[in-house]
Structures are given as structure tokens and as C-alpha cells.
Image (cartoon, rainbow, N blue to C red):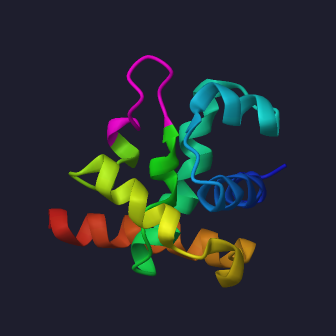
Amino acid sequence: MRTHERAAQIWAVLALAAKNRQVLTYGLVSRLIGVPQPRLGQLLEPIRSYCLVNHLPPLTILVVSEQTGMPEAGFIGASDIPSTQQQVFAFDWIDRGAPQLDQLAEAVADTHLIASLSRD
């Protein structure tokens, strides 16, 4: 399964977690979708990018470390974690619907383009 297909699986898991006001550990998400935990970061990237490009609350903030209870540095997308998690919980992810695979891919490309332009 390709990265964007796995990201779409994770989107569904996180949308349901948000509806139920739950945070999930990296280990749990890894087991739910059947991928090794070290690979999870690259699978969360399309979701993080999609939320960023579309001005949505950062859905990936619901995935946290077992040790710290906090998201990994690259996926935080906010300075006030508890407040931002509340925003994610309040957003109606189920009604919004999941992005299409090509939308996830485009979002990653857009964020990489923005990052490269800001370095120039």
C-alpha cells in the first residue's frame, strides 16, 4: 500500500478518535493500521500537510508518544497542545469527509514547495 493510501487509513482512525475526544499513541496507531512504528511519521505527513494547506486544525496532534503524552516535534503544529487538541475535538471531521488520495499528495507537494521558497 502506498503512503497516501495508508494516510487515508490513518485519517479515518484519527477522525473517529477526534469524534470520541481521544488521543492515541504512536504504538496504538501503528498496530491499528499494521505498519512499524518508525514508519508512522512519514504516513502522518500527508495528513499534517493537508490540514496545514486547507487551514484545518492539525488532526495529527491526536497522535502522541507513549513516554511523554505529547506529539513528536515535527507534527505538533501548535504551541498550546491541550488547547489545540480541544479545537481538533470540536471540529466535525466526520461531516467534512476524508480527503481524496490525490489531495493528500498535492498537499505534501504544496508544503514542500512553500518550505523551499521560504529557504530561498
Q: Residue at x 18, y 68 (%)?
A: 118
* 27 within the magenta span: no
Q: Residue 99's x, y, as percent? A: 68, 76
98, 94: nearer the viewer: 94
Q: Residue 79's x, y, as percent? A: 21, 51
Q: Residue 13's x, y, as percent? A: 72, 52
* 69 within the magenta span: yes
Q: Say left or right for 26 vs 80.
A: right
Q: Is residue 108 above or below residue 92?
A: above
73, 18: nearer the viewer: 18
Q: Residue at x 43, y 62 (%)?
A: 58
Question: Disc count in the image?
Answer: 0
Q: Residue at x 73, y 71 (%)?
A: 101
51, 117: nearer the viewer: 51
For the stretch drawn in magenta, the main secondary structure is loop
Q: Is residue 73 above or below residue 59?
A: above
Q: Residue at x 56, y 61 (%)?
A: 47
Q: Say left or right for 76 vs 49.
A: left
**Furthest residue in direction top, as rendered:** 67
Q: Quadrant of the C terminus?
A: bottom left
Q: Residue 107's x, y, as percent? A: 51, 73
**Furthest residue in direction left, as rendered:** 120
Q: Which residues are magenta?
A: 64-73
Hey, which quadrant is residue 14 in on the image?
bottom right
Hey, which quadrant is residue 29 in on the image?
top right
